[in-house]
Every structure is written in structure tokens, then in C-alpha cells.
Image (tube, coloured by chain):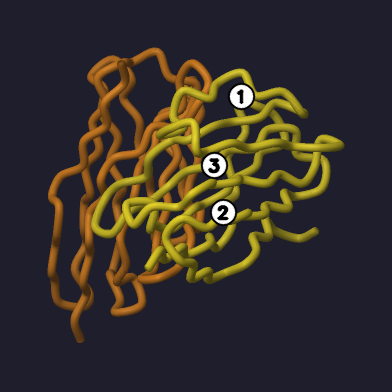
């Protein structure tokens, strides 16, 4: 597609429920990143993919968070047993290559846990 | 561990002023540095990308410079307009990820 697409754009969920956030990168982009932006905070790295592999998962806050990428394209970020502190905007970005090229961000998914 | 700092945190100026936003980073072994703009409730829009071998990049009224040795980048905005009001983020790419500063919130009033 023309840009990075994220869905849903907004998600309100009850505490304890599982949620799935989807990122559809620009076609042909091999690198894909997930970031989280809490209210009034900077962007916090979560995980990145090179192809379907995730060399660095160090930013995932807890084992309730997981992510996968299939076919070198779409990625899903899953949060199990959501907590109120998970409320944030989750941003996805992609790039043609891991190095040297700039990153294009999607519009994000605003997650609210009530 | 890379740390990125942006000064000032907030800036309010009248329309027409030329502005300089500052970004500093602690690890000079970067591949590139990228400036983004974020409007309230929106995602990030890429403004300029400077490779480690470059000194500056220009796009319209925007000019970004990079001095790796001193760990600094500046974003220069000429003839500011109310539409430039947004949060500006710089991000340094080293090792394998973008590390973001906390941003400069810019307001340009008519």
C-alpha cells in the first residue's frame, strides 16, 4: 500500500481482556518496528522484525505482550490480560531496509483499557 | 546506551520567526538521524533524514544539520507559520533501532 496501515485506529477494552493490534507495512519493506507512546511520554521501543524474525524483543514490557509477523508483511501485536497501564498509542513503522533508509510510521492504534 | 535529548521542551513564537530546535545524542556511532513531526492525536510524519556521512538536508523551509562528532543535530525552520504548530521529534538510529528524544512542542501564533 501507499503507507503503513494500522487497525483498529481506536480500541476500548475491559481490563483482563486480550487485544490484537494489526500493522500492514508498505509493500516490500523488510523492517518493521512497534513503539508505544503513553500519554505525555516519549516513544518507547517494543520490538522489531527483520523479515519474519524478531532479533530484538527487549522492549516488550512483560510476557503478556507478544508479536508476530507472517509472510514478511503483516504484523500483529497481542496483549493478553490487558491492564490499565497498557493504555497508550501503539505505533508501527516500516522501512525498506534495516539500515540507511528512513522509517515511515502508521497513524497508530489508541488503546484504552477500562 | 543511546540517549537523545531535545531542547527546548516547548516553544511559542509569533508567525514569521526563524526557529532552531536542538537535538543531542550520547552515542555518535549512528547510521542516520531522522526528524519527525507529530500533530495532536496523530502518528509521526517524517520531515528529514540525514545519513551519518551527510552534514545537512533541506526540504522547503526546513533545514536539518548533523554534527556526529559533537553529538548534535539542529532543525531550522524558516519563516514559521501557524501550520507549523506541532511536536517535533528527533530520532537517532544506531545498532538496530530508532531512539527518540522527548520532543519539542512548538506553537506558532498569528
Chain hosting mark 1 = A
| The disc label shown at residue A18, or none | 2
Same subunit, tags 2 and 3: yes
The colour one sees for chain A in the rendered image is yellow
Mark 2 falls on what kind of element?
loop
Q: Furthest residue to the right?
A: A71
Residue at the spot of label 3: A34
The residue marked by circle 2 belongs to what chain?
A: A
Reading the chain from its start, which is encountered first: label 1 or label 3? 3
Q: In which quarter of the image is the N terminus of chain A?
A: bottom right
Q: Which residue is drawn at 34% across and 49% down?
A: B89
Q: Residue at x 35, y 42 (%)?
A: B90
Q: Colour of chain B?
A: orange
Q: Alpha carbon of mark 2 to alpha carbon of mark 3: how far?
A: 18 Å
Are discs 1 and 3 both within one chain?
yes
Q: How crowded is mark 2: few (under 14 residues within 10 Å), some or many (20 or more)?
A: some
Task: Assign the C terminus of chain A to one quadrant of the image.
Answer: bottom left
Q: Name the residue under label 1.
A: A99
From the top left corner, tell me how far across and down residue B69 is, in percent: 28, 15
Image coordinates of residue B43 in percent, x first then y, are 48, 61
Quadrant housing residue A15: bottom left
* Residue B49 to residue B95: above or below: below
Q: Which of B42 and B27 is in front in this view?
A: B42
Q: Which of marks 1 and 2 is nearer the N terminus?
A: 2
Drawn side of residue A88 relative to residue A4, left or right: left
SS for dot 1: loop
Amino acid at each position: 500500500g501507499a503507507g503503513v496501515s494500522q487497525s483498529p485506529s481506536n480500541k476500548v477494552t475491559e481490563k483482563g481482556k486480550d487485544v490484537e493490534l494489526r500493522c500492514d507495512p508498505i509493500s516490500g519493506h523488510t523492517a518493521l518496528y512497534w513503539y508505544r507512546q503513553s500519554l505525555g511520554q516519549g516513544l518507547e521501543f517494543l520490538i522489531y522484525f527483520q523479515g519474519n524474525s524478531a532479533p530484538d524483543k527487549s522492549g516488550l514490557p512483560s510476557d503478556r505482550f507478544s508479536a508476530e509477523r507472517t509472510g514478511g508483511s503483516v504484523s500483529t501485536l497481542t496483549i493478553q490480560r490487558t491492564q490499565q497501564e497498557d493504555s497508550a498509542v501503539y505505533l508501527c513503522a516500516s522501512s525498506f531496509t534495516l539500515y540507511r533508509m528512513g522509517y515511515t510510521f502508521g497513524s497508530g492504534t489508541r488503546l484504552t483499557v477500562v | 546506551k543511546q540517549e537523545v535529548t531535545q531542547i527546548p521542551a516547548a516553544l511559542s513564537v509569533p508567525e514569521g520567526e526563524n526557529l532552531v530546535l536542538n537535538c543531542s545524542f550520547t552515542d555518535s556511532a549512528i547510521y542516520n538521524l531522522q526528524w519527525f513531526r507529530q500533530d495532536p492525536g496523530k502518528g509521526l510524519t517524517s520531515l528529514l533524514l540525514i545519513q551519518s556521512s551527510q552534514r545537512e538536508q533541506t526540504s522547503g523551509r526546513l533545514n536539518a544539520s548533523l554534527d556526529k562528532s559533537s553529538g548534535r543535530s539542529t532543525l531550522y525552520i524558516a519563516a514559521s507559520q501557524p501550520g507549523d504548530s506541532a511536536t517535533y521529534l528527533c530520532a537517532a538510529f544506531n545498532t538496530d533501532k530508532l531512539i527518540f528524544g522527548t520532543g519539542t512542542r512548538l506553537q506558532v501564533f498569528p
